[in-house]
Amino acid sequence: MERLELIRTLAYAGFFLILFGIAELLYHCGKVQVEITRKIVHLGTGLITLSLPLFLETHWSVLILAVSFVVVLGISKKLDLLKSINSIDRFSRGSVLYPIIIYVTYWTFTLFDDVLFFYLPILILAICDPIAALTGKRWPLGKYTIWNETKTIMGSGCFFLSCFVLTLIFAIPLRDNWIEIAMITLFISLFTTLAEAFSQKGWDNLFIPLTVTATLLASQYLFHLS
């Protein structure tokens, strides 16, 4: 790894640690609820991640970051640290799965040389998922239970709507076929909403981006895009 690439990788590690530190201060000193601090870290991680293609030249750098934070988050859970992320009254693998899916989406982006494969999965996960969770808790209308987890029609509806708008905004400038744009927007919104609804114990952090990626791959196959 070149020296500049290493410096940038270490800088990103520092940015993520600062984000964790802010969440810890909010939780311990500001008495902010853990569900809020988790969403702050969730959103902040997504926003920081969006700049990765601009500054890191190889997926190996992203892999190093992902593995490092999987280890850090795993140890923090074992030792009961990072309470702003881990102090929830349910079992969740979401925090550990997040770094993994960041690497997978970045690797897919480098493989296909198409920024939509990176930005769209990360944005939908970073923005739409917290919107669904927060609106569902604030206005718990239309509760329904899938397996052992309770969701709301309000949360799922807000997820679908925000995902639809976000996908449309990004698909229009990056695709020139309106049939493809309509298909991508509708099916990504529908399938990711279902993925969010059916995912348990934080697995939505994996299945939502993978659903976006699978839909984009299907559109490439159907429309014979390189």
Image (cartoon, rainbow, N blue to C red):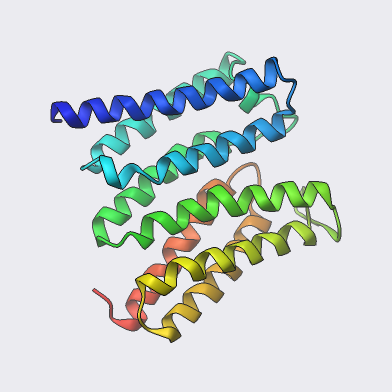
What number of labels is visible? 0
* Residue 180 against residue 79 in the figure, above or below: below
In the image, 210 versus 226, the foreground residue is 226
Residue 96: x and y in percent read: 51, 34
* Residue 123 against residue 70 in the figure, above or below: below
Residue 171: x and y in percent read: 43, 70
Say left or right for 75 vs 142.
left
The C terminus is located in which quarter? Answer: bottom left
In the image, 20 versus 226, the foreground residue is 20
Please tell me in which quadrant of the rendered image residue 118 appears: bottom left
The N terminus is located in which quarter? Answer: top left
Is residue 150 shown to the viewer in this render?
Answer: no
Please tell me in which quadrant of the rendered image residue 152 appears: bottom right
Q: Residue at x 84, y 52 (%)?
A: 139
Residue 186: x and y in percent read: 56, 75
Say left or right for 10 vs 140.
left
Say left or right for 14 vs 34.
left
